[in-house]
Structure formats: C-alpha cells, structure tokens
Image (cartoon, helix red, strand yellow):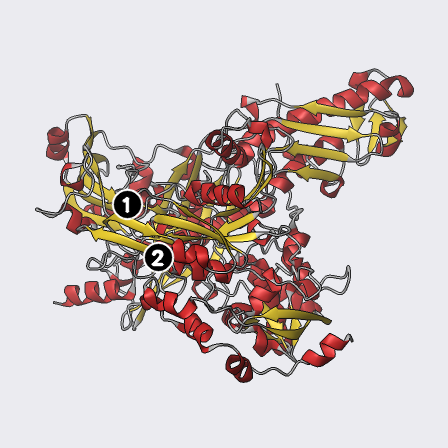
Amino acid sequence: MASWGEASESRLIGKRINRLSGKDKVTGKAKYTFDINRPGMLYGRILRSEVAHATVMGVDTSEAEALPGVKAVIPLIEIGNKLRYQGQEIAAVAAETDDIAKDAIRLIHVDLEELPHVVTEADAMAEGAPQIREDWAGNQSEPNIREDGDLEAGFAEAAVEVEATYSTAVQTHVCLETHGHVVEWEDEQNLTVWASTQGVFGVRNDFAQHFELPANQVRVITEHMGGGFGSKFGPGIEGRAAAELSRITGKAVKLMLTRKSEHLVAGNRPSMTQNVRAGATRDGRLIAYDMKGHGTGGISSGAGFQAPYVYHVPNLRTERVNVAVNAGNQRAMRAPGHPQASFAMDSLMDELAEKLGMNPLEFRRINDANEVRQAQYTLGAQEIGWHRRNSVPGSGTGVKKRGIGVGSGLWGGGGGRGTEARVTINADGTVEAVTGTQDIGTGVRTVIAIIVAEELGLNTTDIMVKVGDSGPGLPSGGSGGSQTTPSVAPVIKTAAAAAKQKLFERIAPMLEAPIDDLRVGTGTIYVVSDRTKTITWEQATGQLGMESISEGGHWDEELRQNGAAGTQFAEVEVDTETGAVRAIKIVAVQDCGLAINRLTTESQINGGVIMGLGQALLEERFMDPYTGRMLNANLEDYKVPGTLEIPEIKSIVFDTHRRVTGVGEPPCIPTPGAIANAVYNAIGVRIRELPITPDRVLTALAEKKA
Amino acid sequence: MSDKEKKQGTSISRRSFLKGVGTGTVAATVVPSVLIGSENAAEAQAGDAISTATIQLNINEKMYEVEVEARTTLLTVLRDGMDTSGNNVDLTGAKLICDRGECGGCTVMVDGKSVYACMMLAIDAQGKKITTVEGLANGDDLHPVQEAFIKHDALMCGFCTPGFVVSSAALLNENKQPTLEEIKTGLSGNTCRCGTYPFIFDAVKTASRKM
C-alpha cells in the first residue's frame, strides 16, 4: 500500500520549502498571459453594453473599420437579440495598438430598444416587477425544498428560539490579472493560446470543439497566472473573440479584459439572504431549524448555499430560491456558498447560545460531530485567549470596544482521477516532471518538485517541473474545489517511484545487489545491507548511456483524503463613534491533512483569511436601481483588503493524518462568521448583514439606543 | 549617439507636445467617458491621423528611443512599446491591473521614488531615471527585498509582486528601519488579492536588516 511515510522519515515533505517560481516572480521575469508580446501582435477590445436590459436593433461598425490601424471588427451579438446586463458583449475589434482598439470601439454605433430592468433582489421580487427571465415567474427559480424529522415536534421541544434574517452582499473575484488570452494561429489547423486560466486542458478542449479541430492541434499555455479564485475556467466569449480576430487577421491577438469588465462579467460570489427560525433545548441541543432564503447569481442560477451549515439539526425545513437580476453571472468563488452559509449559521449559533445563557464555544461542542473541529476549538481558544472575551457583550468601556468571536467551516478537497504525469530521469542526472496541471499561485509547481525530490533523494531545485502547457499531452483537471494538489500528488509520487524502480533495475547488477536492497540517500544510491556500496546520483544515471527513463504514474486513493475542517477565532475593535471595525487578530486552525509544503500552505491560509476578512468588512457590489449599472466597478470604490486592514494572523497548519487534502478554499470560510460574532461581543449589537461597514454599525448602535 | 537621436533630443515638454499635435486628436483623448460612443468621438477622430513624437527614456540605465502619442503612459511604453529600431521594450514586470492609480501593480521608481507608471505620461518621464523591477537586481545578485520576498514566500500568484518589490525598495530608500505600522503605511498604495500581506511585512522587515 502506498503511503507518504512517517514525518520523521521525510527530508522535504512537510517542511518549509521556497517556491521554485520565486526568483522569476520577484525579478519581473515571470511572463503571464498579459505579458506575452508576439511579433506583429494586435490588441483586441470588446464593446460592451452600458444598459442592463435592451434589444439590439442595429450595430454599425463601418466607422470603426475605417479607423487607421483597425484590422478587424466582429459582432458578438445578433440583431434582435437581448442584452440582459451591463457589460454584455456587443462587438470586438483588433487594432495595431491598444489605444487604437479603445478608440475603435467608441466608433461602433449601436441602436438599442431599452427594456425595463431590475438589478436588486428586492426590486426583482417585488410585486409587478418586470419579468426578466421567461422561465422564472416572479424572477424566481422553482424552490429547492428539503425536509427532515418533524419540525413542529422539534419546536415543541425547544426551550429557546431565535428568529432572524442574515444576508451577505455580492462579492466579485477581483483577479489582478484580468481574464484574457493571446491567440495565434500557426496555420488554419494549428492554434496556440496563452490563457489566464485555472484549467489548461478545459480551455484546450473548448477551443478545439469551437473551431472543430483535433484537440492536439490546440496548444494552451499558462506558465504563470494572476489569480482566478474560481472564475477562470472556460475561454469565455472574450477568448473565442480573440481567436476569431486572430483567424481573420492572420496575426496574434491579445485580448485582456479591462478592470471594469472584470467586475461586470467575469463572475461574482452570489448574495445570500436567510430568514431563519431555529430552536434549541435547555441542555443545548439544536432541535429545530426553519429557513426560507434566496440569493442572486445575476441573470443565471447558482446562488446556492448550505443551511444549516456544519452543525446537525434533527428537525428541519429549508426552502431556497434563485432570484434573477440584470447583472453579470455568478461563477464559482473560493468555497462557493460556504462563507455565507457559515456566517449565517455561526451568527445563529451565538444568538441561540446567548438565549440559553451558554458559552458559545460550549454550545458548539455539543452540536458539532466533527472530531477534528472539536480539537481545533481547544487550540484556537487558547491561541486567541478566549477567556478574555466579554462575558457580557458590549460591556467594554471607552469609545473603541474589543470583542472575540468564533466561526467554523468544512470543505472537501480530496482530489480525483484524471491526471497524467511523467517523471523522466536523464543520463546526465537531470530530472523532469511533467503534467498538465497549472500553478495558479498555490505553489503546485513546487509541490511536484518536493515529491519527486523526496522520492529520488534530490533537491527541489534539481527537478525541472513543467506545468501549465497542454503541449506534452498529459492532461490534468482544472484547479477548482481545492483539488489540484490532492489530484496531482498521488500521480507524481507513483511516477517518481516507478522511475526510481527502473533506475534501480538498471544499476542493481553493477552494485551486485538485489533491487529491493537499493535505497536513495541524499544525492546518492546505496545498498541497504552494505553501505560501502554507495554511488552518486550522477554515477547511477550515467549507466543509462543514450537512454533515459520515463515513467507515468497513477491515481491512488490511499495518498489523499477528503474533508478539511477549520475553525477561526477573531478579535476585533469597533470604534463606536465612527462605526469602523478593525480586525486585531485572527487565529485560523486549518486541517489540510499532509501539508506537502508547510510554507506555501501557511500562505494559502493567510490568503483565505484575508479574502474572508474582505467579505466580512469591505466587499460589496453596488448596483444602481435607476441606471441598472454597477456603481463601483473599479478598485477604488470596490474595496479589497489592503495593507492597513491586515490584522495579526496566526495560521495554524493543523496536522491530522498523512494523506493529502487541498486547502485553497477552506480558510476563507470561517472568517466572516468569526468576525461578525466578535463585533457582537464588542458592542452588544448584532449586525446580521455583510459586509459590516461603518454605516451598518452606526445604524445598529443608533437603533439600540432608541 | 546617432544623428537622428541628436536631432530629437530629450527636451520635448508635455505642453509643446500637445501644441504640436492636432487639436482633434487631443480632444479625442480627453472626451469624458459619458460622451463616448456617440458622434463626439467620431467627429473628433474622423480623418485625423494621430500625431506622435520621438522621445528618449532612461530605463534601468539604458537609453530607449520610442515613438509616443500624447496620451501614451510610461506603463504602455514599458509593456507594449517598441523602440525606433523596431525592438520591443518588453519590460513587462510592471503590471497593468487597475489602469487608474488604485492598485500599485505598475509601480516603478522615478529618480528613486515610487511612481504609478499608469498615471505618468511617457513624455513626462523624459530626463528622469526610471528603474523597473527588472533593473533592481545587480546582475545575478538580487536586491535584498527580492531575496527576502523569496525567503518569506511573500508572493502567491505573483502578479502584484513586482509592484510590491519596487514599493518596498523605495520605502527602504526613505526609511531604513521601518516599524510594522510604517511598512503597512508605506505599502498602502499596493494591492494583493491572494492575501500575501503578512509575509510581505515579514520580508520587508528582513530586508531592512540587510540593507
């Protein structure tokens, strides 16, 4: 049975290893899709709708085509079709410079017949609202209903009840490298695409299908990628437009979205509203849960969330609908549905605990069946100083009040089949590891090097890792669901082990030892029963002569595991005069099984916490009901966490077992709930709406006074 | 220096440049976005060839002669520019992220101070010493900030990293031993979406001890 071995046996696995791409990234040498400059390359731009709902009556591109430097203009919507949100694509141009392309799209004349729009959920659900999706009466999907146990009996048994509404805003991904591609046709049958994507092979297959080409005649390259967070899978309309412009002009075309478009059309995390009534028994058991909720993923569906979350309730009824609005479609965003679910549930848990007069942590312990999280509660409470919290919420003195709160999360991240990889040992001693996954910033390139180097007794810098290229024809899945490392690691490990075995077979006769007696040292191979028989790695590979060893790997269930529990504790300070909430410290206790690289795992936990902090305190898409436009489609008015918002973060890699579990998403889940509970503990007024902005805090404080 | 270079000189000011180009073109570049998409832009553009000028820029201690429009930013020259001999400038370390001075992804040093290259017109960068992230290292010897960023894993996707590296180096030029609060304030003009900040703070601390 394959295993990763004991921690004491590991030389590299589980240690803090520097990223292989570090030097290229700090020197500016790393080339992202946005940085690719091809000979004779043209720049693409897209004309987008500035209205939220309209029928396209005509598009006149003649003036744009006549502008010097413009090489092609293509329509992206048919006359008579409807535009259903601001930002929707109308036409695309390719020009010699980006500035000319920008001028050209201004010269495209569009005749529109405007239709009534709704851009907020309240407006969409109001009686008499214009129906914007033909298949959804009242702009709402068929309800998703779940029932378990006996709700009435549950409430009859409850000693306390809480009835409350929790809601979260739409958040956008804000990938710093906007979505986009550089596309170049080698000839009519061969296409090369540099793509800012989380799924090299998915993009390859999409282009191949779209242009009816054999898949291996499309090569997709993503050497480095500037953030995706779930929003960068297919090529999108912009990718196909770039390829079409390139095909027409016979030139390479770079088409990257603008910052504004990135907010409007490149995905978002749906909103959530839960109207909950829940009850608990006197001894602290959750007993009944009744929830009616909704969310919007724009004009599309996909605004799902789990309710209840993490904690078990025996008697429940939940009813959830999607609400359509005239706004860009949602896409998966880091742990889709989970942070908002966690925020609502953990807020509810605290409210119930208070009614019971119970310590919120104790109340969680009673209702949480997850053993890992039970242990995390103890560790986290110790790290944050749980005893320091206000036993009476809001009882602190002074203008600035501090409080402490807790939140919980659970994710899968167990990986899956579908990765092919090769590990090659060359006669000159060099080693290559190749697979079609992509490093979206999580550090999988380095993870691969660690695994191969550990198996072969080498250093990470000895391993040439090639990822982010469909050219070698070794597929791997998209980087979603925290699946990259757990999917790739078993295949890489078995490939490296197979290559090592082949090398042992070649050198065993020379060492006059049975193959099973050979072991790798550090840069050496030796006979375990006779350590005088030791040769260097180069002496060993020298035996290969003109050949090399190249082995594939396979999926192995035993090397990975599903299920990543997390708990976070937050301490905040609320300025009761300005309403500003400042996070002071966040302790994140995160299970991720075997952390192959502890350093980059810590980076990911930090990153998750910070994204969760943004959702808790800052991020909100504002839609203007009158014009139907997004009011803050830039980086000044849509606020993501900056240096000044960053608290002390204690990221704890919580070791549980020695199987690999992905950790990209789960650390962002418990943060908003922990922060919201800390705010309540500080001021004694509960904010049930994210983000917890100064206006919401001041309004809540004023309502309490009144 | 070639004859051509001598003739062009480096003294074209923004004002004289703007005078030199057709008013139609200038109008087009300053049309407020609310008017765009109508006849205004068309009127301004129709038939006008866009005027350009040749300027010289000192980037990473190398002179580049480039042809620019009035509206061409320093960032456009670095990333997309071509010198008059037809070679790409290709200094793509500085990134175009927000395109309006909100995120710091395009930060470069101009005469030792950090500047958003997306907010500086190329013609305004004449006669100044421009250092991009590519020019920070001394050959194979990385700048202490670069070393420290690698050591502390102060990067994930790495797209904001060049901006942070340059801003950090500029900060340490002015304040050799910044406190944590001073580091946060000094780097508050840069944005990271992966959430690398805590390790960036650590890296700047480490670098400050080595400088």
Secondary structure at numbered mark 1: loop
Secondary structure at numbered mark 2: loop
Horizontal relation, residue A684 to residue A137: left or right = right
Where is residue B203? Give x, y as percent: 61, 61
Position of B186 relative to B90 (above/below): below
Horizontal relation, residue A115 to residue A592: left or right = left
Q: Residue at x 43, y 53 (%)?
A: A174
User: Mark 2 belongs to which subunit?
Assistant: A
Pick the front one: B194 or A252: A252
Position of A392 relative to A604 (above/below): below
Where is residue B83? Give x, y as percent: 67, 65
Where is residue A114? Give x, y as percent: 20, 52
Pick the front one: B35 or A110: A110
Number of marks drawn: 2
Q: Residue at x 75, y 31 (%)?
A: A456
Residue A697: image quadrant is bottom left
Residue type indicated by callout 2: Glu
Q: Let me know if marks 2 and 1 both belong to one chain.
A: yes
User: Mark 1 belongs to which subunit?
Assistant: A
Position of A158 relative to A147 (above/below): below
Give the quarter of the figure containing the N terminus of chain A. top right
Pick the front one: B23 or B35: B23
- Residue A423 can be seen, yes or no: yes
Where is residue B116? Give x, y as percent: 53, 70
Instruction: Write down the residue under mark 2.
Output: A619
Residue A530: image quadrant is top right
Q: Earlier in the sequence, mark 2 or mark 1?
A: 1
* Residue A538: assigned label: none
Density class for disc 1 (Cα within 10 Å; few <14, some 14-19, many ≥20) is many
Instruction: Write down the residue under mark 1.
Output: A298
Residue type indicated by callout 1: Gly
- Residue A362 can be seen, yes or no: no
